[in-house]
């Protein structure tokens, strides 16, 4: 149930969901095996599903900026 606040990607971010799930504020859902690439300038927030811990592999080109 963790809510991660709205933020902007200052550089490209790539994620691979390993366990659990999260729900993007645009309605997309990401489950194990799903890949999400956030281009530079992208803004969003997300909520982590509460049925099991969510683990992702993450590569950040540059830090994010919380809005």
Image (cartoon, grey):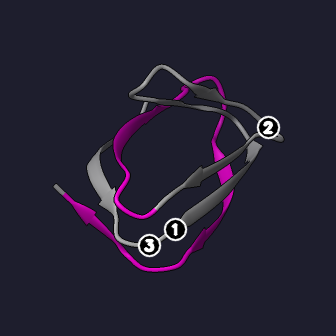
Q: Residues within 10 Å of mark 1 (few under 14, many from 20)?
A: some
Of helix, strand and loop, which one carries label 2? loop
Q: Please identify the quarter of the rendering in which residue 13 is found.
A: bottom right
Residue 25: where, in percent of width, then height?
38, 28
Query: Disc 2 designates what residue?
Result: 32
Secondary structure at numbered mark 3? loop
Residue at the image point whose x is 55% and y is 27% from the top: 49
Q: What x and y, as percent, mark residue 10? A: 35, 71
Mark 3 vs mark 1, CA separation in Å: 4 Å
Q: Nearer the viewer, mark 3 or mark 2?
A: 3
Q: Are marks 3 and 1 in contact (CB under 8 Å)?
A: yes
> Could you tell which of marks 1 and 2 lies nearer the N-terminus?
1
Q: Quadrant of residue 6?
A: top left
The quadrant where residue 58 appears: bottom right
Q: Which residue is mark 3?
A: 11
Q: Name the residue at 41% across, 36% down.
A: 46
44 vs 15, left or right, is left
Magenta residues span 40-66
- The mark that comes first in sequence, 3 or 2, is 3
Residue 4 left/right relative to 60: left
């Amino acid at each position: 149930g963790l809510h991660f606040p709205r933020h902007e990607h200052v550089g490209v971010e790539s994620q691979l969901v390993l366990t659990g799930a999260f729900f993007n504020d645009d309605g997309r859902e990401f489950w194990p095996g799903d890949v999400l690439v956030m281009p530079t300038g992208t803004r969003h927030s997300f909520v982590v599903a509460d049925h099991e811990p969510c683990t992702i592999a993450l590569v950040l080109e540059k830090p994010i900026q919380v809005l």
